[in-house]
Image (spheres, helix red, strand yellow):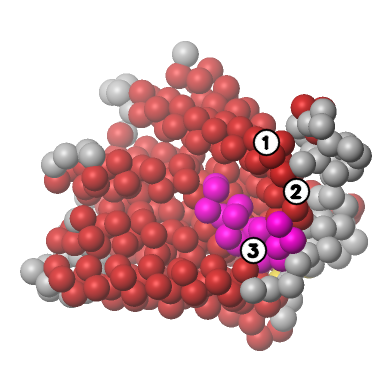
Amino acid sequence: MDAVLLIISFVVILAGSELFTNGIEWFGHKLELGEGAIGSVLAAIGTALPETMVPLIAILFGGGMAASEIGIGAILGAPFMLATLAMFVTGAAVWLMRGRRTSGTTLAVDTGVINHDMAYFALAYSIAIGAAFLPVEFEWPRRFVALVLLAIYGHHVWGHLQADAAEHEGLEPLRFHRLDRGAPQHPAAPRLAIVSVQVVFALACIIGGAWAFVDAIRDLTASPAVNGTLIALLVAPIATELPETLNSVLWVRRGKDTLAMGNITGAMVFQSAIPVSIALVFAPALWTVVGGGVAFASAAITLAATALIFGSTYIRHRLDASLLLVGGALYLGYMLLVLATLAGVTF
């Protein structure tokens, strides 16, 4: 039964992602926003909601040390999964579709948008991880860091909103256009109201599907034959990152590479600022490297992946799918580290 629920929830997330990518493009078109604002802000925030809810509920409403520790692990896991596994899947999708793409294995991205995201991510995440090295009793400095992170994210969003509007080439008809009976030229020009309905409905599918996916995995861990810690560290986080990953694959298939990459890089900026701020304000004593070596090792790998993948992009002003595949190797390395730790190997 749990396996069936996994399949059903995945299909729901996939359907929601399809509706969301189509709806959010129309939403940006109606508001005359640029690709950076659509992919790195609107899409990123929308698809980051499932994994953001996990630490929010765990820290604010979970009660007890164990729940807060789960929240901290989820906060660290989100940027890690985006920088490694989501990048790898997107790069693999580009590689597999290279024959039907005009740019081949090179992603036709606006490097200005991507570099903007990664500069803010590197700044925010470095500050966030730096706060974990403060003495445990320094709670107020950690709360001040939370304010700094919120300011950084606000400035990041403002920068994208100031960009010129996108051309929105190849905009497909709104999936819900048949429900828009009042549109004078439907499906060519759906009203903002029906576009908003589709976006909200898609988000509900994504969030609901992600929660069902996580619940199914959680039930699987009840089996004595399954290692619950291994599932929690390596498998469960994949569920909450499915929306960003699936959205990016769908956009890559349509040749909209800036939206595809912006969805991931924008979510990375969001995850480095908003959930971390929640932890720094409501669970400051737990945001520390003391006793959290394996968990915070993921942060080092995240920064390494960012430097390896986007350092070249910043210098060469181009991004190739082969660079994104590096994320898979780094994820595999971390998986081996977790397995070794669970086996009792000390480093």
User: Does residue 311 appear in the picture of this structure?
Assistant: yes
**Residue at image coords 76%, 55%:** 29
Q: Are marks 2 and 3 in contact (CB under 8 Å)?
A: no
**Residue at image coords 16%, 65%:** 290
**Residue at image coords 71%, 83%:** 316
Q: Are marks 1 and 2 in contact (CB under 8 Å)?
A: yes
Amino acid type at circle 2 is Trp
Label 2: how many residues lie within 10 Å, few (<14), some (14-19) or many (20+)?
Answer: many
Q: Which residues are magenta?
A: 31-47
Q: Which residue is mark 2?
A: 26
Between 199 and 112, the one lying in front of the other is 199
Amino acid type at circle 3 is Ala
Mark 2–mark 3 Cα distance, whole angstroms, equals 13 Å
Establish if 52 lies above or below 221.
Answer: below
Furthest-left residue in view?
137
Q: Which residue is mark 3?
A: 37
Establish if 222 lies above or below 40.
Answer: above
- The image position of residue 249, as x and y in percent, is 70, 48
Res 311 quadrant in image = bottom right
- The image position of residue 257, as x and y in percent, is 74, 60
Q: N-terminal of the two: label 1 or label 2? A: 2
Q: Which residue is mark 1?
A: 198
Q: Considering the numbered disc 2 on the image, is that residue within a helix, a strand or a loop?
A: helix
- The image position of residue 205, as x and y in percent, is 57, 31
Q: Quadrant of the C terminus?
A: bottom left
**Residue at image coords 79%, 49%:** 253
